[in-house]
Image (tube, grey):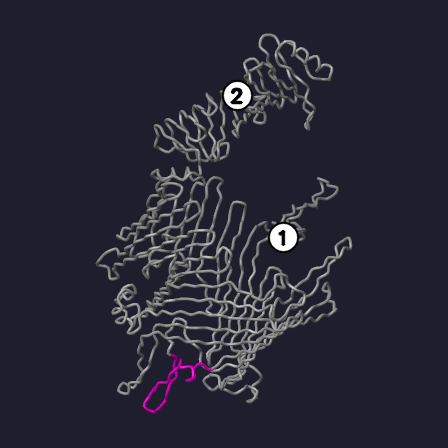
């Protein structure tokens, strides 16, 4: 055996000649890499062998043996590359004749030089590796195999085929620590295609504590994200209510049928006999349609029938959600919720669910023409209010709308267009039906809205109304044109026309015997029409100022005044025939009413309208100029007020109260990330002793110009620091010359204790903060509201601890709104959470400790004693 160290080019050429003379392989010098390492490249030249290129290098030295078998020994950051894989280690022995390579660390226990084999995304670390790069078989001592999101460690690992590995005394875990928090230890393991792990005599360990049950054999799928059927994770519950007692929550089964359909069946059961059964099925097919169906049933009962407050209560819930894309131009959606009034109060502990006193369902279909010529929509919606047991069923409703047409607009827009070129018109219609159920007995009504819908006699019995289902049809058309084409003034005229179709009208009759007015339904087709016209004039005015204030240079005021005139005839006159008069008493007093008052779209309005309206929009801007250290000028436009709008109208045709209230609205974002909104209503008429408005102006009675009747103000912002503050290290000030025998340097206290500032707390946090204030005067009654809300408060105390909550305070009522506190802790491969609601009549807590990995978590859910890592005072978030 000869030994050589590559010290120069000439010596390296000699080695190449020797290697070429004694074998069918050749070697050539590699250029020095970025790390300054020398290396050799060998390639088999056997014809027809199909052997691939083998590259090897070492930082320290290369030693070759040419007698007998050809071997190369690599020392110091050794590396051997082949299409079968790449091996790195502190020391590698390469046998070119047997196509094998063996590797081990330079010294025992040296983790930096441990052999690592990488192939096809696999990474195997071992104390000793023997690998054949032609057959792709190998042996490993105390090796760790990485696969997907898990790892397998074994004392002896043998690869018998490219995709088959045998392991003796193996440990499987999804925890990436060298000493995992939890693992499955088996006598023997077999990994096939990195997809399945077979084992014999296995046991689960948590914090090195063995689970008492031993599995004689089993299978672990390595695809951690694959959905599989299994038991749900139950928890023991003690509810702070006298009618339930102890129980088990979330006991059930999750069924995975395929990638398109999954189903969950779960339930709660308590010692009192109270139970809840909840089933939910979800489906999704190629993103063409998806949805879910939820069906829930619960029965509550007290602990003992002899208790004074013993009662039984049954609640149901049906939810159907479906979203379907029929084509690129058509879609169908369903959001259906049917439930009893106390379902959420008895079975949900979500604050929003418990505060919800109504439900809304909707089914809709929408179609848009491929060229956008028209749109068609159909829907039906239902709203149920549990406070008064009322139900409103709207639909089926059909909407049709044509694309707006501009018949005189030329194909090429001209610089000076004619007034008629801007002429455009539009058309739309709508069909609607309405069913309103308002029982006289309210929540005590024995007739449900479904019974009243199916049987008109039940509807009349429950509501006392002779009507039943109201239907109607309306079609509308409008035309508009810009009469004065100009870049400075905009003069626009508009005409609107509406037509109503109804199958019935109403007639009111005075009954002198009962001294009251009764209403009757008159069957028969009836139509009504109304129209109105408007003329509007608008322009834009700019005002600028060169005044300067600190870094602000110049101000600009943009004003957009608008004047419009609206006209509508009095459709309540006898000429149109839409209104009638009826006596209201025996004294001869009469009342005017519309025969279309019960129509789903109403009817033509009463009273002539000749109104002129004024509005003024204002925008205030300025320019902020700053210079950097180099003197470079940086300019930024800042809007002080985004919009300040004032509007008022005067109706010449009204008999009284001709002048409408003054409406003021303002919004601004002058401060970074803070939004301000304000609105106010000013009335110009005086009031009487009861606070009601009288047709007399305030200035006529010397009471000023206007009185405030309504005011609202709100501000909102979001805090989310982008960069965490850096804590400066404490700098100790020691004397320049220190004499160990001079004790005057030492004091009973530190004289410089307060000379250093308090270090900032390095905490990432975020919250949404909003404040709203409203003031309203109704007659002589004043109503005020002032609420401060801090939503989504998130404080990351450390990289592993997180605190979240939402707080609210009502300054008028002087109380806190219901809230919930949550604490989260990341325990590397575990998650710990604690939720607590200490306020209100519904108080609870929930503690949860779970494994991050879903596969191990599912295994623990099936093992007795490990499926109860939750502790709560009451079930929450049940839907």
Mark 1, other Cα within 10 Å: few <14 / some 14–19 / many ≥20: few
Would you say residue 584 sits in the magenta stretch? yes
| 81 on left or right of 744 | left
Q: Position of residue 15 (x, y in %)?
A: 68, 13
Q: CA distance from mark 2 to mark 1?
A: 56 Å
Q: Position of residue 856 (x, y in %)?
A: 41, 37
Picture quadrant of residue 421: bottom right
State whether residue 130 appears in this view: no
| 314 on left or right of 665 | left
Picture quadrant of residue 65: top right
Give me the disc on residue 747. Answer: none
| Marks 2,1: beta carbons within 8 A | no
Q: Residue furthest left?
A: 306
* Image: 740 above or below 368: above
* Residue with the mark numbered 1: 758
State whether residue 134 appears in this view: yes
* Image: 196 above or below 353: above
Element type where label 2 sits in the image = strand
Viewer-side residue, 154 vs 420? 420
Q: Residue at x 73, y 59 (%)?
A: 626
- The magenta span reads 570-594
* Image: 583 above or below 84: below
Viewer-side residue, 252 vs 418? 418
| 13 on left or right of 478 | right
Mark 2, other Cα within 10 Å: few <14 / some 14–19 / many ≥20: many
Q: Residue furthest top?
A: 68
Q: Position of residue 32 (x, y in %)?
A: 70, 24
Viewer-side residue, 727 vs 378? 378
* Residue with the mark numbered 2: 129
Q: Earlier in the sequence, mark 2 or mark 1?
A: 2
Element type where label 1 sits in the image = loop
């Amino acid at each position: 055996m000869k030994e050589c160290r590559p010290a120069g080019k000439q010596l390296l050429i000699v080695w190449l000649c020797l290697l070429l003379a004694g074998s069918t392989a050749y070697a050539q010098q590699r250029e020095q890499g970025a790390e300054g390492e020398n290396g050799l490249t060998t390639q088999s030249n056997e014809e027809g062998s199909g052997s691939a290129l083998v590259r090897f290098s070492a930082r320290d030295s290369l030693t070759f043996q040419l007698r007998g078998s050809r071997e190369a020994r690599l020392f110091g950051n050794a590396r051997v590359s082949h299409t079968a894989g790449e091996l790195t280690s502190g020391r590698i022995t390469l046998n070119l004749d047997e196509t094998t390579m063996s590797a081990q660390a330079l010294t025992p226990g040296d983790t930096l030089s441990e052999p690592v084999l990488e192939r096809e995304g696999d990474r195997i670390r071992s104390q000793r590796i023997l690998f054949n790069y032609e057959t792709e078989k190998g042996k490993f001592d105390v090796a760790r195999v990485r696969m997907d999101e898990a790892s397998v460690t074994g004392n002896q690992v043998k690869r018998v085929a490219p995709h088959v590995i045998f392991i003796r005394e193996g440990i499987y875990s999804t925890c990436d620590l060298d000493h995992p928090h939890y693992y499955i230890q088996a006598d023997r393991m077999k990994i096939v295609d990195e997809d399945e792990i077979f084992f014999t005599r296995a046991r689960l360990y948590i914090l090195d504590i063995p689970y008492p049950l031993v599995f004689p054999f089993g299978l672990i799928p390595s695809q951690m994200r694959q959905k599989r059927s299994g038991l749900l994770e139950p928890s023991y519950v003690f509810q702070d209510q006298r009618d339930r007692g102890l129980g088990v929550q979330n006991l059930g089964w999750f069924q995975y049928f395929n990638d398109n359909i999954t189903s969950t069946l779960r339930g709660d059961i308590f010692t009192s006999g109270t139970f809840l059964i909840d089933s939910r099925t979800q489906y999704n097919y190629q993103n063409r349609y998806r949805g879910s169906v939820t069906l829930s049933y619960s029965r509550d009962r007290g602990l003992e029938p002899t208790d004074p407050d013993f009662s039984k209560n049954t609640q149901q819930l049906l939810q159907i959600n479906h979203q379907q894309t029929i084509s690129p131009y058509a879609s169908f959606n369903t959001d259906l919720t049917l439930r009893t009034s106390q379902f959420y109060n008895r079975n949900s502990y979500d604050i929003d669910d418990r505060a919800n006193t109504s439900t809304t369902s909707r089914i809709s279909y929408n179609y848009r023409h491929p060229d956008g010529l028209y749109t068609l929509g159909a829907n039906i919606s239902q709203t149920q209010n549990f406070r008064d047991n009322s139900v409103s069923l709207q639909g089926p409703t059909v909407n049709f709308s044509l694309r707006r047409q501009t018949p005189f607009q030329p194909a090429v827009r001209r610089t000076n267009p004619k007034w008629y070129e801007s002429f455009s018109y539009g058309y739309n219609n709508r069909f609607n039906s309405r069913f309103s159920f308002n029982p006289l007995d309210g929540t005590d009504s024995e007739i449900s809205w479904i019974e009243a819908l199916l049987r008109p006699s039940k509807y009349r019995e429950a509501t006392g109304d002779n009507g039943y289902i109201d239907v109607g049809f309306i079609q509308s058309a409008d035309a508009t044109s810009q009469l004065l084409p100009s870049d400075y003034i905009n003069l626009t005229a508009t005409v609107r026309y509406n037509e109503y179709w109804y199958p019935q009208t109403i007639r009111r009759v005075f009954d002198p015997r009962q001294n009251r007015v009764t209403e009757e339904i008159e069957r028969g087709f009836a139509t009504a029409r109304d129209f109105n016209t408007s003329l509007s004039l608008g322009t834009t005015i700019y005002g600028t100022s060169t005044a300067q204030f600190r870094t602000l240079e110049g101000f600009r005021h943009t004003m957009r005044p608008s004047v419009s005139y609206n006209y509508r005839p009095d459709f309540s006159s006898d000429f149109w025939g839409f209104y009638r008069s009826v006596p209201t008493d025996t004294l001869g007093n009469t009342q005017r009413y519309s025969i279309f008052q019960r129509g789903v779209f109403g009817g033509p309005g009463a009273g002539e309208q000749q109104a002129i309206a004024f509005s003024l929009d204002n925008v205030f801007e300025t320019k902020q100029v700053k210079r950097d250290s180099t003197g470079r000028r940086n300019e930024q436009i800042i809007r002080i007020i985004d919009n300040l709008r004032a509007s008022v109208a005067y109706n010449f045709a009204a008999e009284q109260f001709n002048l409408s209230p003054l409406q003021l609205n303002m919004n601004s974002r002058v401060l970074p990330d803070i939004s301000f909104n304000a609105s106010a209503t000013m009335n110009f008429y005086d009031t009487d002793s009861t606070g009601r408005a009288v047709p007399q102006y305030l200035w006529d009675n010397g009471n000023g110009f206007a009185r405030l009747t309504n005011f609202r103000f709100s501000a909102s912002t979001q805090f989310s620091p982008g960069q965490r503050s850096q804590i400066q290290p404490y700098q100790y000030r020691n004397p320049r010359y220190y004499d160990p025998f001079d004790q005057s340097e030492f004091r009973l206290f530190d004289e410089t204790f307060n000379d250093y500032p308090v270090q900032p707390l390095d905490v990432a946090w975020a919250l949404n903060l909003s404040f709203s204030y409203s003031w309203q005067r109704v007659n002589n009654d004043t109503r005020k509201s002032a609420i401060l809300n801090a939503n989504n408060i998130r404080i990351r105390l450390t990289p592993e601890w997180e605190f979240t909550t939402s707080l609210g305070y009502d300054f008028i009522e002087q109380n806190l709104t219901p809230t919930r506190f949550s604490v989260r802790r990341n325990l590397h491969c575990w998650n710990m959470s604690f939720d607590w609601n200490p306020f209100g009549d519904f108080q609870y807590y929930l503690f949860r400790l779970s494994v991050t990995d879903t596969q191990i978590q599912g295994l623990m859910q099936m093992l007795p004693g490990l499926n109860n890592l939750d502790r709560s005072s009451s079930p929450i978030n049940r839907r």
